[in-house]
Amino acid sequence: MQHFQVGKTGPRISQIGLGCMGMSGIYGPSDRAESIATIHAALDAGINLLDTGDFYGMGHNELLIAEALRDVKREDAILSVKFGGLRDPAGGWTGFDGRPQAVKNFAAYSLERLGVDYIDIYRPARLNPAVPIEETIGAVADLVKAGYIKHIGLSEVGSDTIRRAAAVHPIADLQIEYSLISRGIEDGILQTRRELGIAITAYGVLSRGLISGHWTKESAQTGDWRAYSPRFQAENVDRNLALVEALKKIAGAKSVTVAQIAIAWVLAQGGDIFPVIGARHRDRLTETLGALEIALSKDDLAAIEQAVPKGAAAGDRYAAVQMAHLDSEKRLTSMRRPRAIASILLTGRSSI
């Protein structure tokens, strides 16, 4: 496992990170013991980036990571934490809070749940349109000065917001969805953050399992939020699974799996892009690590592009209520007023 610096100012992290969200029930029931074993196996393999959010399982995910790291040297794990997502007791999503006082409150709770003195990378989960990004990042910068945060990241924001945030404090990375079927960042965001020396930590590399080669229409479990995802809806899923079948032919010719091809494609897009893979089980982690051994030639990349051309996916990557407040999708311009935003955010039950 090789390690590289994240952007101009960030820590050194592994080529692949471990996304821990799925270990807290978002995709259906999870196995606590297996989750902890998977975290340990990732660390043993040289993966040091563990990604979480304070709202994953309403704090469950941070407590799980704390348990897994109980006998691990603090410096051996790079903890990346998203904050700001608001939830209700039923598990619904009620908005995002980027106010300075809320930022410091969220950090205090995360530090306690994780059982650490500092967080390596801290990032707002989404842009709060009612709060200037300068105020949110300024509050995180205060935490950096106080020693509670080492580096600042962003998540799902567009070029203008990236520039404004970077003017307040150096930004290590932008966490954003990037995969063969989610390539929106190629239309400006990718170039902006490269210009500023900001890395990408890419989530959704397997599109929540859709292009992993493992998911089928019979795979859905009770409590799996993918039931609300447009790409998994009946009118779209068959078209999207047809893309997987096209990828299977390429993977088969190279004697690798579809998931490995999909991960290798993201790795091939640049050394400043770090896939964050949500492996919940050790066998999936082992498959993920195999992607590091795959070298894609120009011919391979051309074949993949032909099999899954940009824009080929059917359906948006989130339900409409969530897409409406993705700054990275530039759909906020007509609804800047806080009252309008509140009305939108209070209606959704999708994932972050």
Image (cartoon, rainbow, N blue to C red):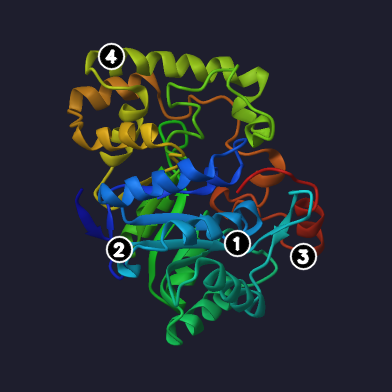
Label 1 vs 2, first from the N-terminus: 2
Residue type, mark 4 in image: Gly
Instruction: Give the x, y percent position of residue 316.
Output: 60, 34
> Is any part of residue 158 visible from this angle?
no
Label 1 vs 4, first from the N-terminus: 1
Label 4 vs 3, first from the N-terminus: 4
In front: label 2 or label 4: 2
Q: Which mark is residue 76?
A: 2
State the SS at label 1: loop
Camera-nearest residue between 153 and 3: 3
Residue type, mark 1 in image: Leu
Badge 3: residue crowd in 10 Å (few <14, some 14–19, many ≥20) = few
The reply to whether the C-beta atoms of the residues labelled 4 and 3 are less than 8 Å apart is no
Mark 1–mark 3 distance (CA, rounded to whole Å): 12 Å
The residue tagged 4 is: 252
* Residue drawn at x 73%, y 44% as measured from the top left: 349
Mark 2–mark 4 distance (CA, rounded to whole Å): 36 Å
Camera-nearest residue between 351 and 218: 218
Instruction: Give the x, y percent position of residue 105.
Output: 63, 76
In front: label 4 or label 3: 4
In front: label 3 or label 2: 2
Mark 3–mark 2 distance (CA, rounded to whole Å): 41 Å
